[in-house]
Image (tube, grey):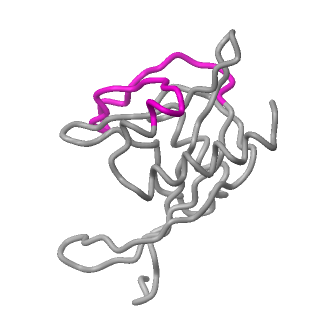
């Protein structure tokens, strides 16, 4: 039962790790014919946002992580079957615990990579996604792991 105002709920992850020498790195994905971006997906019914964020990151990238805090929410309109839908994506700061990078080919993900903050910001095309990484970097300077 869809109401006119029912919006699409999404979650995404600003997934980070520190290298052995203390460098901060971010996990980016690249879909077929797409740009480098952060992993994201839909919240299943009955699923909490944080559970959904961890699941989506694991499914898309093979990385297990834990949610540290919420970074921000972005909202925009998309067109689905030529209908305008409102989409809200909640991004979380996620600390990568373990796992091996494994792109989800079903989701048409072709490449995954860990990038320094500078490199990640250079590769991300969308301003709203770049802003998430910038906010995540600021949050991390307060939450040391």
Give x and y (percent) for residue 90: 57, 60
- Residue 63, quarter of picture: top right
Q: Judge left or right: residue 84 versus residue 46.
A: left
Q: Pick the residue in front: 58 or 95.
A: 95
Q: Which residue is drawn at 44% across and 30% down?
A: 119
Q: Name the spot of residue 105 as percent of width and height, x first.
A: 30, 30
| Nearer to me, 51 or 138 | 138
Q: Is residue 128 above or below residue 140?
A: below
Please indicate whether residue 114 sits to the left or right of residue 18 in the image: left
Counting from the top left corner in percent of width and height, residue 13 is at 56, 45
Above or below 92: residue 123: above
Name the image quarter holding the N terminus: bottom left
Give, as a single range, the part of the protein colored magenta: 96-120
Residue 37 percent across, percent down from the top left? 39, 42
Q: Name the residue at 28% across, 38% down.
A: 31
Instruction: Based on the picture, tell me whether residue 83 belongs to the magenta stretch.
Output: no
Residue that protrudes farthest toward the top in the picture: 20
Identify the residue at the far bottom of this view: 4
Q: In which quarter of the image is the C terminus?
A: top right
Q: Is residue 15 above or below residue 90?
A: above
Looking at the picture, tell me which residue is in the foreground, 4 or 71. Answer: 71
Q: Residue at x 52, y 26 (%)?
A: 116
For the point 81% across and 44% down, the residue is 142
Q: In this view, does 40 lie above or below 88?
A: above
Q: In this view, does 25 lie to the left or right of 48?
A: left
């Amino acid at each position: 039962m869809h109401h006119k105002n029912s919006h699409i709920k999404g979650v995404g992850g600003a997934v980070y790790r520190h290298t052995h020498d203390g460098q901060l790195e971010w996990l980016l994905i690249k879909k077929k014919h797409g740009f480098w971006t952060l992993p994201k997906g839909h919240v299943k019914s009955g699923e909490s946002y944080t559970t959904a964020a961890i699941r989506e990151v694991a499914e898309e990238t093979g990385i297990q992580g834990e949610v540290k805090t919420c970074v921000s929410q972005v909202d925009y309109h998309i067109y689905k079957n030529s209908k305008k839908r409102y989409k809200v994506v909640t991004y979380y700061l996620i600390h990568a615990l373990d796992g091996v990078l494994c792109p989800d080919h079903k989701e048409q993900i072709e490449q995954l990579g860990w990038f320094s903050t500078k490199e990640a910001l250079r590769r991300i095309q969308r301003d709203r996604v770049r802003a998430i990484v910038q906010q995540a970097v600021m949050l991390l300077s307060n939450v040391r792991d």
